[in-house]
Amino acid sequence: MPATRVLTGITTSGTPHLGNYAGAIRPAIAASRRAGVESFYFLADYHALIKIQDPARVQRSTLEIAASWLACGLEPDKVWFYRQSDIPEIPELTWLLTCVAGKGLLNRAHAYKAAVDRNLEAGEDADAGISAGLFMYPVLMAADILMFKAHSVPVGRDQIQHIEMARDFGARFNHLYGEHFVLPEAAIEESVATLPGLDGRKMSKSYDNTIPLFAPPAELRKLIFSIVTDSRAPGEPKETEGSALFQLYQAFATPEQTAAFAQAFADGIGWGEAKQALFERIDAEVAPMRVKYEQLMAKPVEIEAVLVEGAIKARRVATPLLQALRHAVGLRDLRAQFEARPAGKAKVALPQFKQYREADGRFYFKLVSADGRELLQSVAHGSPREAGERIARLKRDGAAGLRHVAGEGLHLAGELIGKLSEDAVVEEVTAALAALSEPA
Ligand code: TRP
């Protein structure tokens, strides 16, 4: 069974808080350890620019969020962990999607509509102070998701509309240009999708009611003690329903611990004691990770290196897909044959590998373009199997990794694999390989 791809991003606009941890980081890391799952987790720093115009803050937040994921146990070599702005294919795909996205649909995006409503209430022009970046936010987000053919996108409820828009843009593109994109689904973790903040509303930077994930213990305790409660005295039974304190506890406790806490509420536990219990519960989970976090924050060189590696890995997926998309929309090498849009499900002619045996008894292949021109001749192989393995590697990595070395020939990962045929150029070869690349 093919792997399920799970993808999610965190905007690098602030310091990670308990809501980000329980709602995104923790479930995402647990999911990344499941068999049959390929996880793509990234730092949405282009998205941050929509809200934040303070460069030092964007940088600091990127470092903090990267360090948080790693401190919480993300294993970068088992997942795709990267920074959005390291993948130039994402803004390029954003433009391709922009050209199929309905403006009317974007007009109805919640974040944009809320900004317009605020302006109108204040008696301002509808679009006063609203950047085109805010308006285009859902298209950039759709590019994040569609670029990696994600099946499942774990997000908070406030983001469901964005996933639906990604499906809409992806479906329109597929309809016009052939089946390139997987249509994603939002995945909401029912129990912990959103945590309440200090004031009981959703924990969010924009409400200024957050508890930083790695606040030092004294600050963590102080913040927990500032959580809003009702005025019931110790000894009076307390409601668990609607209690921010209780909901926070639940997000960090086993079902048995939660049941015991609910009983304590019914038995009239005092708010001070309940807050102390909550502090201890959260600190027990966070303290070991806090130590790692502080070590990582002291070594930005290491975090940068992890992200650079992650970008290389992510681009191995993004580059071939984008080449195929460019071809699909007509951004093409002018020497290639004109090729219309695929009509319905009609098959488009594809480039082909042809294997053969020479008089020397050795095994070769050539790559032939969709219009029948020879593009590449391989070096000799000892067996058909070796030749077949080369072909498989070319299909997988060739579009992104093929290099032409003058006087020698075509190299893949430092290995000579063949030579260009007469009149062919390396771009034709990589475009042909992109068209053949196994659906990742
Ligand atoms: N918009 C998301 C948020 O604010 C962050 C994000 C950006 C994202 N790109 C994404 C989430 C792609 C999931 C998939 O929470």
Image (tube, helix red, strand yellow):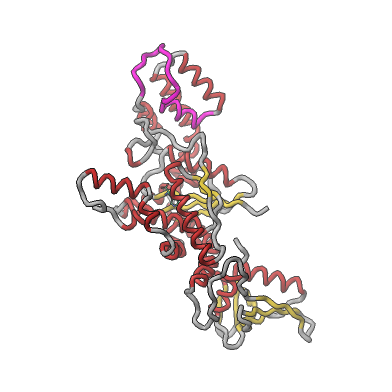
Q: Which residue is at the front of the view, 373 or 170?
A: 170
Above/below status of 349 relative to 170: below
Task: Name the spot of residue 324 as percent of width and height, x first.
Answer: 54, 69
Q: Which residue is at the front of the view, 298 or 87?
A: 87
* Apparent side of residue 11 relative to residue 311 in the rendered image (left or right): left
Residue range of the region highlighted in magenta in the rendering: 229-253
**Residue 337 visible in rendering:** yes
The C terminus lies in which quarter of the figure?
bottom right
* Apparent side of residue 162 relative to residue 117 in the rendered image (left or right): right
**Residue 230 found in image quarter:** top left
| Main SS category, magenta section | loop
Task: Name the spot of residue 302 as percent of width and height, x first.
Answer: 47, 54
Above/below status of 256 relative to 93: above
Q: Is residue 101 magenta?
A: no
Q: Does the magenta stretch include residue 244?
A: yes
Q: Which residue is drawn at 37% across and 36% down?
A: 210
Q: Which residue is at the front of the view, 300 or 206?
A: 206
Above/below status of 225 relative to 147: above
Total marks in image: 0
Task: Name the spot of residue 212 as percent of width and height, x first.
Answer: 39, 38
